Amino acid sequence: MASSTAAVPFLAPPLEQLRHLAEELRSLLPRVRVGEAQETAEEFNREMFWRRLNEAAVKVNGEATVLTTHFSKLPWPSPQETQRICEQVRIAIEEIIIVYYSLPKDQGITLRKLVRNAALDIVDGMAQLLEVLLTAPSQSTENGDLISCNSVSVACQQVPEIPKDNKAAALLMLTKSVDFVKDAHEEMEQAVEECDPYSGLLNDSEDNSDSHSDEDGVLGLPSNRDSYWSEEDQELIIPCLALVRASRASLKKIRILVAENGKKDEVAQLDDIVDISDEISPSVDDLVLSIYPPVCHLTVRISVNVWTLRGSVTLPDYPETVHSLNLELVWQQASPAIALPLCPQRWSNRYTHVCEIGVCFNKGS
């Protein structure tokens, strides 16, 4: 006799469903990173976009709370309930991604990057939350703290703080670059102030009379070359410090220019300014790291050459405000003793100084 009972579809245990969902979210991250904006004939509605994005973030945050509440203690939900919860999480995550894809490129690449990063943080945060729930002991009372401190909630709460146009996005990125170079400059200045090339000499002499190697050639020079700057090193530090100082000043000038004269509809120009300014921060970082003892002079010269190539890029026209905005290398007169050790192939007899970045404004005719 045939059974009249309908076959019940098999559902994986809750643990397996959570693991599968975490893997699914991880697989979404590369696609979001390279995803293009959706082509549409409809006119972009800025107000609607931000409302949808904020609502989607609130929904994801709510689903994260539900997920944590149900799976941070025993007994876990049934396979059927787990399936329902996981599906709601999928829907919420997909909505965030769909809203991001709806932001056209003509609204600004810098703005799209900020929204993309926010979407990535949310997806990654949800995957992390699932992984924590899978690995943490369910009976642990510490799991209750996940409701208030999991990373997906933090990422969702940052969504309303995203700049709403490309000019605001550009100013945010320029401010980050200024702050980064400022920290590097202050770190470098502090290192120079605290530098004592003969620190440890007395202790070395007292502890070990053979501490001075024959290679030094001069009695009394410390042997711990890995922890101090030689005179030759210090000749490099002066122009390097000037480079970092010039970078900081130039980025500040660029930020002020964008704040005072930038137009929201000058999307491409703002993106170009941010792209080129973004090249300065890693160059400064490489340069600062290269001057710590033991100093490799070749590495310093390479860092300077890369920095000057990045700094000499010409930005496109900036209409109505200035005819052109250029990051140029300005060579000023100074002692060859300072400049030539740094990068001799770049100095002439007349202009023998460390390069500074100058922001040149040529008014349109």
Image (tube, rainbow, N blue to C red):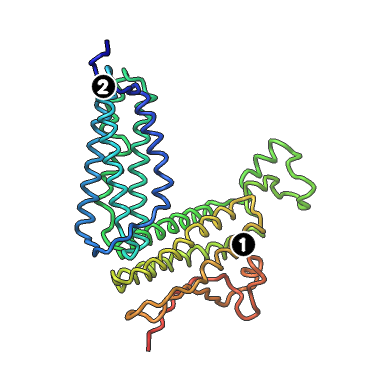
- Closer to the camera, 202 or 148? 148
Q: Does residue 24 show up? A: yes
Q: Does residue 231 show up? A: no
Instruction: Give residue 242's position: percent from left, percent from top.
Output: 52, 66
The quadrant of the rendering that contains the N terminus is top left
Which of the marked residues, 1 or 2, is nearer the chain's N terminus?
2
Residue 299, image quadrant: bottom right
- Closer to the camera, 55 or 247? 55
Give the answer, above or below, for where 87 lies relative to 28: above
Query: Could you say whether the residue bearing mark 1 is in a helix, strand or loop?
Result: helix
**How many marks overall?**
2
The quadrant of the rendering that contains the C terminus is bottom left
Residue at image mark 2: 77
Residue that appears at 30% across and 58% down? 103
Give the answer, above or below, for where 83 lies relative to 58: above
Residue that appears at 51% across and 59% down? 284
Instruction: Give residue 363's position: percent from left, percent from top.
Output: 38, 84
Left or right placement of residue 15 versus residue 218 in this view:
left
Residue that appears at 38% across and 29% down? 19
Q: Amino acid at mark 2?
A: Pro
The crowd level at tag 2 (other Cα within 10 Å; few <14, some 14-19, many 20+) is some
Left or right placement of residue 182 versus residue 331 in this view:
left
Residue 324, image quadrant: bottom left
**Farthest residue toward the front?**
1
The crowd level at tag 1 (other Cα within 10 Å; few <14, some 14-19, many 20+) is many
Residue at image mark 1: 236
